[in-house]
Amino acid sequence: MAVSRLARLAAAAPVPVFAALGAGARGPVEELTLSDDVTLVDSPRHATVLLVVGAVPRSLIRPLSQVHDQLAHPRATAWWSSEEATLDPLPQATLIRAESDVVLAVGGLHAALLRGERASELDVLPDEPANPWRGLGANGQGGEGMMGGTPYGRPMAMTGEDRDGLPLDQLHLRLGPFLPAFPAGLVLDTVIQGDVLQECAVVGNPFERDELLGGALTATPPDPERTLAAMERARARHHLHGVARTLRLHGLDALARRTLALAMAPPDDGDRVRYLAHRLERSTALRWATEGVGRIDPSAAEAVGGIVARAAGWSSDARSDDPVYAELGFTPIFRHGSDAQARWRQRLAEAAQALDLAAAAGERRSDGAALELPWGDDDADRRLLDLLPGLLTGQELGDAMTTLDSLDLDLERVARAVARTERA
Amino acid sequence: MPLASVYANDWLAIPVLLAVVVGGVYLVSVLDELFGEVVSGSRPNLGRSLRLPVRQAALLLCQSATRTEHPDRILWPVAPAAYAALAAAGMAVIPFAEGFAVADVRTGIVVFGAAEVLTFVAVYLHGWSANAPLALIGGYRSLVQGFSFMLLSMFVLIGVALPARSLSVGQIVEAQSGLWNVVRHPLGLPLFLVVGLGAALWGPLRLPDSRELAGGTVGEVSGPQRLAWEFARRAMLVSYAVMAASAFLGGYLGPWLPGPVWLLGKSVAMLAVFVALGHLVGRVRPERFMAQAWTVLLPLSFLDILIAGVEALP
Amino acid sequence: MLLAFVAALTVTAGVFSVMLAVRLLRPHDELGTTWSHGVPLLGGQAPETHAWSRFHARYYPMAIVLIAFEMEMMVMYPWAVVYVELGAKALVEMAVFLTILSLGILYAWREGAYRWQ
């Protein structure tokens, strides 16, 4: 039969997966892009499998259900988790344990769906319009002037002032947390006029004081017994992941895969990373896309610390004071610019440096590597999150996403920092 | 040539054109996959790349079509169909061999330019019709990028029309029997490639459908409509590759081999360039692109037309 | 010219018939029409208003500059055909014309027309 033949072909296609990130999920999800059998897609409409990854706070179950309902049919949900997740919010989800082969499991779901062995999942949220029909005219327009009323279940946008003096319509949008450039759990309340963010505020942090469902995939605490070489390699891996994420955001999927492959199997010294950095720095388009975007005031950047500070001209690095690092000839790399471009270049340079250090370190051990974490210190993310609204306000939406990506923000680290202060 | 025989030829050209569109779209998908594997450092797998487009198309045919809250139900599906049709209409003015074209009209490059401009309408409507914020922003982005590169394409194509003393693509090809236009005025081809990337929303100029807008104009689209959209984008790329080969690389002209083989080879080379650019050049910022298009690329196209003009003088 | 339309229409008809045929053949489409499926993408949230609005296209000064150039294109097409006959005179004329337009571009650039307002 023609249809079943089509279905067999479709079942053999790479599985389009939309990943909904929980805590400790970003790394493992990005590594999925290296697989030939899975494609990470940008929109839930393009996916057959919704892959919920890691620990999701209970307060995000409602947005998660919304994303679930937005997937095209046929669809299925899988929850990739290190622990037995409570699946009651999404009863139809299949649990994939952290240690099992996720590509195989997702592929099985996809094939079963298309062959008709598994029914497409129904909506979780009720099938009701957002607002009741209300208004005066035949199409519910009514209300004030031209744009009032609630035609077809939603009000129309209303005008607002703007910096160029043209009062045009504003959209009040709550963005996130399941958008391509967004870190897990980030929700922004925004006012958008045209494509520029006029106002921007962070809506809480769902990882604070909220019950977590499922378990993070990469929640391994730093092992104090590890050698300096192992810690530096982990640092390089972290930074290369960040660069791969940036490349993917800018549509360079193949180069992102190349960078990720370097992160998965770190080379013995920094030369290959430096070669990659050299190639990317010559790219005009990447420069156009990131130069001058998301510029942080240098004094604010210094307060944040880590890469953000070193990309703003400060040489602050906790490793500088460490005798073992001094023995290896370590001096911090820094550069000026304090924009998204300076930050991805800084990440690449530090990844190369970390690999060189790892090569030179031998069996040495030191506390210095643990002092300067890949993301600065434990509180760096909290300070970044405070800066975020001011940084994004006034930016074009694409630039705002570039900025967000360049910060390597992690809301779960923020929640841990908050919990630590509260204990202290 | 008698009118009747011209028509006899031209009717035959329609199935040829359709075959070029469909075959070209498939080829773009295969090349894209192969280049992606090369750039990412893995070993290219030809068998897999040949099968992949068919499987992905089959998957989209098996998916349901999304309906957002109150989209424009007529214009939404019309947009990809119009986009594909404009690719075909643009290609219709290009001769595949000497005297063999769907419609090698006297105003060939005007028709091609008109099809290009209407492309922005198709992309804009695709983003607008969904009644969704991110898709809408994508739609308006298509206008800024279109307005920025539209003039380039006109100037560059007029540059190739000068030595031919005609706006017909057939005449433009014939005028290159001595020397290809890419040698006569070398600025033209690179500028035209930028236009092609923009018209097909490809690589660095995939701004309306970009990832940070969760797919932009195509973000709300699933199933067969998305297949139609991806087909149309690739068809547009094919249309620009064939036009680039005809306007700058001598089209069907060449020794020993028959004309269509030459055109095919040159067009595939152009497609390969497009696909490689897509993997090696990242997305640009809309604002930055607008500024550069007007202050750098447009003056370059003036220079191109000046070079072409001086060169064309007897 | 007629045939170009025929070709375009054939492609349109082809794309439509595929979309339509698939819609008739497929069992899932009934499921894809619910309210919660139709909520526009925002990463898990629902919008407060319709997206359709008086959009602030921040490149409007550039769009106005473009209109001026579009008019100029109308002159260029016939100019290209007679260019070789007229020779150097045509070149000088167009050079003067383009110089004036270039001044316009420079002026618009100084006024910030190529920036997001």
Image (cartoon, grey):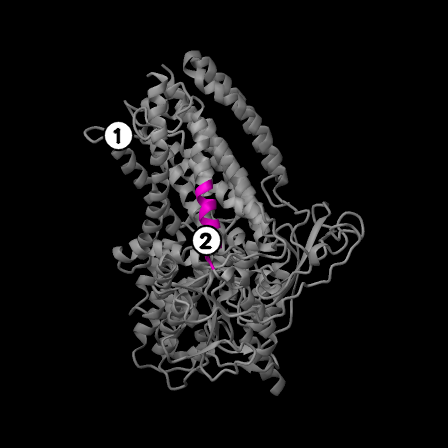
Q: Is residue B14 visible?
A: yes
Dot 1 alpha-carbon crowd within 10 angstroms: few under 14, some 14 to 19, many 20 or more: some
Residue at the (55%, 55%) spot, across then down: A399
The residue indicated by pointer 1 is: B259
Front-most of residues B238 and B104:
B104
Please, what is the three-letter code of the amino acid marked with disc 2? Val
Front-most of residues B85 and B61:
B61
Front-most of residues A3 and A400:
A3
User: Looking at the picture, how far across and down is residue B14, in whole percent?
Assistant: 37, 33
The residue indicated by pointer 2 is: C22
In the picture provided, is C91 more to the left or to the right than B171? right
User: Looking at the picture, how far across and down is residue B71, in whole percent?
Assistant: 61, 52
Front-most of residues C46 and A319:
C46
Indicate the secondary structure of the residue bearing disc 1: helix
In the picture provided, is A36 more to the left or to the right than C61? left
Rendered image quadrant of residue A127: bottom right
On screen, A385 above or below B91? below
Question: Which region is colored magenta?
Answer: C13-26
On screen, A274 above or below B15? below
User: Looking at the picture, how far across and down is residue A59, in whole percent?
Assistant: 61, 76
- Is residue B82 part of the magenta span, yes or no? no
Camera-nearest label, 2 or 1: 2
Of all chains, the one bearing label 1 is B
Dot 2 alpha-carbon crowd within 10 angstroms: few under 14, some 14 to 19, many 20 or more: many
Q: Quadrant of the N terminus of chain A?
A: bottom left
Residue at the (57%, 52%) spot, across then down: B135
In the picture provided, is A154 more to the left or to the right than B88? right
Rendered image quadrant of residue A265: bottom left
